[in-house]
Image (cartoon, coloured by chain):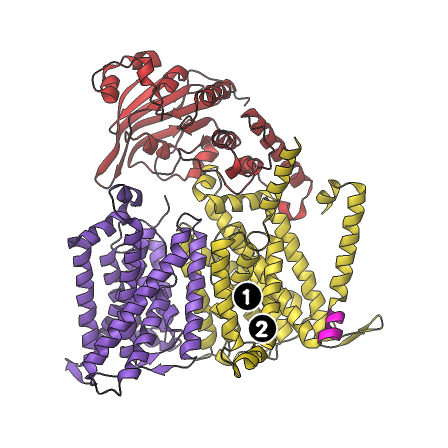
Amino acid sequence: MTTPIEFDVNLLELSHVAKRFGGLSALSDISLHIRRGDIYGLIGPNGAGKTTLFNILTGLYQADSGRFTFNNTEYSGRCKPHVLAQAGIARTFQNIRLFANMTALENVMVGRHLRTSSGIWGALTRNATARAEEHAIVQHARALLSYVGINRPHQTLAKNLSYGEQRRLEIARALATDPKLLALDEPAAGMNATETESLKELLLSIRASGITVLLIEHDVKFILGLCDRVAVLDYGKKIAEDVPEKIRCNPAVITAYLGTEPIIPAQAGIQS
Amino acid sequence: MRNVLKHLSSKDRRGAWIAFVVLAIVLLALPFFTDALFGRGWVRIMDFALLYIMLALGLNIVVGYAGLLDLGYIAFFAVGAYCYALLGSPQLGLHLPFWVVLPLGALLACIFGVLLGAPTLRLRGDYLAIVTLGFGEIIRIFLNNLNAPINITNGPQGISMIDPIRFGEFSLGNTHELFGLTFPSVHLHYYLFLLFTLLVIFISLRLEDSRIGRAWMAIREDEVAAEAMGINTRNIKLLAFAMGATFGGLAGGLFAGFQGFVSPESFSLTESITVLCMVVLGGMGNINGVLLGGILLVVLPEALRHGSGPAQQLLFGKTLIDPESLRMLLFGLALITVMLWRPSGLWPSNQRRRELVAENDTAQL
Amino acid sequence: MDTLLQQIVNGFVQGSVYAMVALGYTMVYGILGLINFAHGEVVMVGAMVAMSVIQLLIGSGLPPLLILLISLIISIVVCMTLGYGIERIAYRPLRNAPRLAPLITAIGVSIVLQNLAMMFWGREYHAFPSLLPNNSHMLSGAIITEVQLLIVFVALGMMGGLLLLMHRTRLGRAMRAVAENPSAAVLMGVNINGVIAITFMLGSALAAVAGIMVSANYGIVHYYMGSILGLKAFTAAVLGGIGNMRGAMVGGLLLGLIESLGAGYIGDLSGGFFGSHYQDVFAFFVLISVLIFRPSGLLGERVAERA
């Protein structure tokens, strides 16, 4: 979290990325740039290809063509999720995927796996190095748990946390990997107004600590009120990319979402 | 241990030490008591129980921690046993010392584990189950048939006259007089096996509560999420396989040295299932549960063997069901019942207990 | 006698049995995404029941074909009930449980069935009564018995019927829908529990027939016959592409041929080091090779990898 924030450099670049499933073209010719330090939003109607794009960025799918550059390194072609995590992309899942039978603390500790190195030997001998590392992992994980606002005993099993806590635990786990880019798949889904508000504050504070944030959302109001830049997908194509104010009155976006009527904020809040 | 003690008050700490010392004395005196009360046959059964516990602990790493269902686990036991048998018997005329052969067998089993795990690891778990099942059978077919044209394994007759485990001039195959006490061979093996079992327990506990152990459990809980968190799932799963297989090979070597005889018959699918039952019944991923499962599943069938015949005689006037198939039938039923009604096994797992502690914490707040 | 042709004939006969059993694996896998570990035991039960029925009726003076038909029907009914029971006990309660759970219950069911069979029918090998005259025909140098001919024709007929069922009927459409997307199928009004139960029962019916075929071909039944046969049939399903019914058929025939040719020539190939008792090993090597080089199988579109 000590990296200087360079606002003028792109952290992630996609050019002409395409993905097909069988005969279905899920994404075609997607190009976009995410600048360091931005909160970048990705919106679009259901089935627009948001999650597909997201899965390409995190290595779950491979793009059929196009270039994918992250932090000045190219990751096109076969790239496993753990390699991208190593490179600094951390993610959460739309349908929460915590390690249900592990404690909240352990969930976050698993996130530290990547940035630590003890192996079998360290585990067996518990030498000074291993002990120090383990201690650091616990401290880091505890700090992250309170940072995202989980005030329960840290020994609570992940599956017994409330829905909002589970969402935040996923964020804490992702943060534990020391990401450069935190990619969140519909983090506000199913949250009430208060929870959404505190999520917003959390995301702003994460950004303030120097981490770039990528958000996929259904909730257009949420995203337009939070993001620095927003891209809109429809039928696997990018139909707009701009600052929120411009997106709000972009005719193509309005057509994609509502047919012909303009988005007025009250209507735009499509809560799921 | 030290960590646990640190958290206890001084009074509790003294209690823990006393419990520890009492347990140690009981474990040390156990073969003599058993010998005196039930006869030497039961000491032998205890020796086998320890071997099974080692196997169950090894399988627990694969199935319980990493969530990879291995149905041919006994094959690694076979590899260890045959390695010992071939290098320490008249079969090939080799008589390498115990301290060379045993690690070699464990290493060989470990290599087999990795070789077998590698092709299946990017596939779904059930493929692994069936491939390991096949592998278990294949190993047995090879052991059965590698007696011609060159006689390597001596086929179905097996290898006999295997060298006993020997430390220098001190052979575990003989009775020894020490400190004024008579130690028959089965007693000596008991202590050796106990030592190894404690070692395996120690290793398991250390691994469970470590970076590697957490990675295993993360994979068990959700492989996709684990990989997204930067865990190289392939390597970590292979590591689980290698560790499990190593323990299997180790137990196999000890088995060969103890028995003095190995044959393919000892390594059937039934044995794999028995070990799996121990892990599932006691509680997957939980050392105490696995220990309990191991002890139960060795002692109960023995009791069954002695008890079911007379009981059936009494009830029906003849033996309807032979104890061996009754045993397997009960194992099968146990697998079903446990999975349906008590998936975490007889002994609630560590997490469950930790959770209970956490609930108490909340209650006090 | 031409050895090569003979091996091909034998392989084809054995392969049709594998194909029938493989269909059971593939159908369940297609619909639940699980390997039905107890399927091999269903084959064994089918064979055992048929044997007992035939033994019971053989002295009754009924015509042999009628006896065969009665035993076939009884064995199919028993196996379908068994298949339904397996689904209800081992799979349905655990449909949303972690994947390991149904796998373990299925193994439990398989052990229980095996040991019950052993108690019921004993440990020994039984001769499967031969009802049909043991006539054989020469086929340009290879011998094929009438039983073998019957096996191949019945297998082809049943597989053809199954394909028709899958693609031409409401039930088949429902089954394919559930395989494709269970939750969507529910929304479309498909009775998903019913469809799954029927899938298990259909697979078990095929298994019963296969059990009778394999016992008639070898003339032997044994309580342990199911597990190794199951393993091979599963291999056949993977070879063809698991979840794909045509794949299971092709995979079964192919595996039968590979095994038969392999066992026939391994002695020559290895310079006499390996003999034909390594026959059972081939299926395993086929399985491993497919998993390494083409996990989706020959005809599989579905990738076995977990997304």
Say whether residue A255 is visible: yes
- Neighbourhood count class around disc 1 (C-alpha, 10 Å): few under 14, some 14–19, many 20 upward: many
Q: Which residues are magenta?
A: B31-38
Mark 1 residue element? helix
Nearer to us in this view, C244 or B296: B296
What x and y, as percent, mark residue B254? 62, 68
Label 2 chain ID: B
**Residue hosting label 2:** B304
Chain identifier, red in the render? A
For the colour yellow, the matching chain is: B
Of label 2 and label 1, which has the lower sequence position?
Answer: 1
Of the pair B16 and B234, the residue shown nearer to us: B16
Whole-percent x and y of residue C27?
Answer: 28, 57
User: Decide: marks 2, 1 in contact (CB < 8 A)?
Assistant: no
Instruction: Report the amino acid beneath label 2.
Output: Leu
Is C89 drawn above or below residue B355 in the view shown? below
Secondary structure of residue under mark 2: helix
Name which residue lies at 44% across and 67% down. C112
Above or below residue C171? Residue A60 is above
Left/right of residue C51 with respect to residue A72 in the rendered view: left
Residue A84, position as x, y percentages in the image: 43, 35
The percent coordinates of residue A262 (x first, y second) are 25, 13
Q: Is residue B59 above or below residue B182?
A: above
- The residue pinned by badge 1 equals B77
Magenta stretch, main secondary structure, is helix
In the rendered image, residues at marks 2 and 1 fall on the same chain: yes
Which residue sits furthest right?
B180
- Chain that appears purple: C
Quadrant of the frame with the N terminus of chain C:
bottom left
Residue occupying image coordinates x 78% and y 50% = B17
Dot 1: chain letter: B
Instruction: Please tell me which residue is depicted at 55% across the width and 71% down the height of the picture.
Output: B82
